Amino acid sequence: MLGNPELERKWLEMTYDGVMTVMGSRKANVDGETVVTPDAVLYADVPCALSFSGAPNGEQGEDAGEIEYQGTIFCAPELEIPAGCRITVTQYGVTYALRYSGEGITYPTHQQLSVTRKGRA
């Protein structure tokens, strides 16, 4: 199996238990003018896998109830997802609102996106 990226990708994608929707800015040329749509859906219902690293951080004191997670989304390598996008992932019946602030790491079989989730518990 190793050395065959198409087969490896097929097997890896069989482990994707989530779907994601990616929202961000989209530029379009309308009548010779550049129009920016700030909350455009760039991708919808794309298969993915979401993995969190470690346990969520919970704040004490005045910020009690605030949580922050670091995570990684695994998805198709051909997706072009710009930094600053908002990504919603639904996996195992739970929906997570995430921010993508970095640059994806792309392999022949998949792409890894570093994301954060910050909000109220």
Image (spheres, helix red, strand yellow):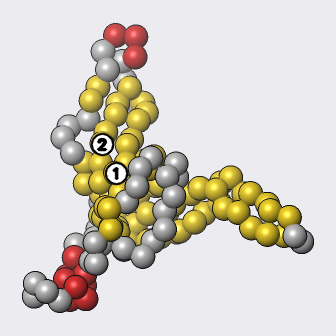
Image quadrant where residue 47 sits: bottom left
The disc labelled 2 sits on which kind of residue? Gln
Amino acid type, callout 1: Ser
Contact, CB < 8 Å: mark 2 with mark 1? Answer: yes
70 versus 74 height, above or below? above
Q: Which residue is mark 2?
A: 70
Disc 1 element: strand
Q: Position of residue 74 (x, y in %)?
A: 30, 64
Nearest to N terminus: mark 2 or mark 1: 2
Q: Is residue 42 above or below residue 6?
A: above
Pick out the residue farthest to the right. 31
Q: Regarding mark 2 in the picture, which secondary structure is present there?
A: strand
Q: Residue at x 37, y 43 (%)?
A: 116
Q: Residue at left 27%, top 77%?
A: 109
Looking at the picture, how far across and down is residue 69, in whole percent? 31, 39
Residue assigned mark 1: 114
Q: Residue at 37% x, 60% y: name it.
A: 104
Is residue 104 depicted above or below 97 in this figure? below
